[in-house]
Amino acid sequence: MNEMSLLNRLRDEVPPQTELRAEENRLLAEIRTGSDAPAPARARLSRPRARWGIALAGALGTALVAGVVTTAVTGPDRTGAVPSQRIQASAPLARSQQPSAAAVLENIALVAEKSKMQEVRPDQWTYQKVSQPDTPGPTFEMWMRMDGTQDALRENGGKIKMGHEKGPTYPLKTQQELDAFPDDPDALLAHLRGLKQSRAALSFCPPGCPAGTEEDVKAYGAIQWYLEAGPVIPPAKAAAMYRAMAKIPNVAIEENVATPQGRKGIGVVLDLGEAGKMYTILDAEDYDYLGAMTVTDSHKSALWVLASGVVDKPGDIPSS
Amino acid sequence: MRQQSRLTPDRAPGSTHDAAVIPILEPEPSDDASVIARSRHDPEHFAALFTRHAPAIKRYVVRRLGLEAAEDVVAETFVAAFQQRASYDLTRADARPWLYGIATNLIGRHRRHEIGQYKVLSRTGVDPVTEPFTDRIDQRVAAGGARGRLAAALAGLPTGHRDALLLVTWGELTYEQAALSLGVAVGTVRSRVNRARKKLRRALGDIDPTAVTEEFRS
């Protein structure tokens, strides 16, 4: 026996399976709430296919018959929105200064309010193409059936892989949540601050945000997440989201944020001082959602959305 | 020659395989990268990664730190992985190097505890790490035996060497995977492992190979 095989037999008595319930519950708590809140003891992950909570809605067939409106659905390059309707940024700002978040976001809200409509059926699929933070990174295209019964993935233009597990979060449910948003920005902000589950396109300030900022982070993260994940965002709701963002303390505008794809963006930034900055990046021309970025002293991560829309089947991409 | 045309000469083309004309989209077992990509939208998907990898990672961490510390390290590993999922490199189908890398960082916070337990084993012949898993009274082995010597050698290794060595043995990673875990070049892993092996060999020294086999069989 040489030293390697001796080493391999050292502590070999440790069994392949040991109790993992505590670890599992910590992860579940994180997934559900985005925090280290104490986990409910039920829900076991390691059972195959065990799903926790959420009876599947019976109302799938009825949803989305009414005209749903979009600001987000554009072509594969996320162009072709409504620049002509854009309201010019308020003029009298000194050139060297960043414009006020309230003014910029109000303009974006006004544009959003006038955006086009698109109807979506439960048997249609949302499409999104994202890229890795690093450039030139791989691209991932994901199709999700609105009713959540199937999804599909394609990596780097390769083969489409189908999946079928229905999770508690799926486009139709996200759409229903969006549709139920209050139109009033204050009411919306209160709603988002009170969400049970914290959401964000990117995780932020783990293991915890500075005291007193938790609810702001939750509301900001939720808006970011709905902008990214919402299949079609009704104009009134989009406007309310941008206006709500403007009401979150420490939200500022950074102009001329470049994406790795060379798009010029406007950064709506939640600045938490030493805990870092959370960016939601909108196209400088048409205010489409381009991606999210978090930046701390030691770490930077980003998720860029290259294209998105609604299509009839996996493999289709939205036409411009 | 196409065998099929010989066997079905009378049938109209296509009639045999009508069902196959429409491609049926079968769900495929998804690799780790797909799970992580999905989890960015639907965080619950991340649970699949836990189901897949937590048992092996737990065993690895238990072997290094013992049961009690391992619980925290494994929980923190998966929570950290979940939080960092947006920055996962989706070109890597297998998430184990990433997960073991996070675990290795967290194990590093318990370095003194880890070394202390190797030393206990080396001095007393009783291994606090394996104690909970064995009901044998006679697990105590002669101090100075092969286990003790190995443990003493492990305790004396530089952290980076111990990490590399244990990732490719207990962690069952390849050298390439261990390099990804540790964020170093493959050559670095290779040289660390080689140097660590040399030290283990020296520590085992003149020990009687038969006695060693006996000891490990017990």
Image: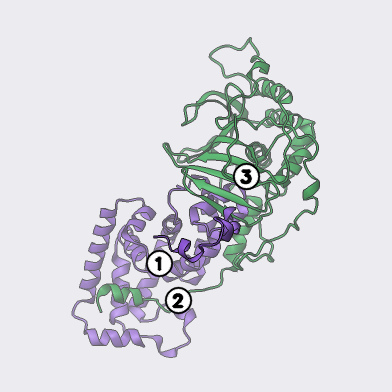
| Mark 3 secondary-structure assignment | loop
Contact flag, marks 2 and 1 (Cβ < 8 Å): no
Q: Amino acid at mark 2?
A: Val
Q: Residues within 10 Å of mark 1 (few under 14, many from 20)?
A: many
Q: Between disc 2 and disc 3, whose residue precedes?
A: 2
The disc label shown at residue B114, or none: 1
Residue reaching furthest to the front:
B10
**Closest to the observer: A320 or A295?**
A320
Residue that lies at the very extreme toward the left in this rendered image: B206
Colour purple, chain:
B
Front one among A244 and A303? A303
Name the subunit of mark 2.
A
Q: Nearer the viewer, mark 1 or mark 3?
A: 3
Look at label 1 and name its amino acid.
Glu
**Tag 1, which chain?**
B
Q: Is residue A221 visible?
A: no
Instruction: Kindly identify which residue carries mark 3.
Output: A313
- Left or right: residue A290 versus residue A177 is left
Residue in the image at 58% along x and 54% along y:
B21
Q: Secondary structure at mark 2?
A: loop
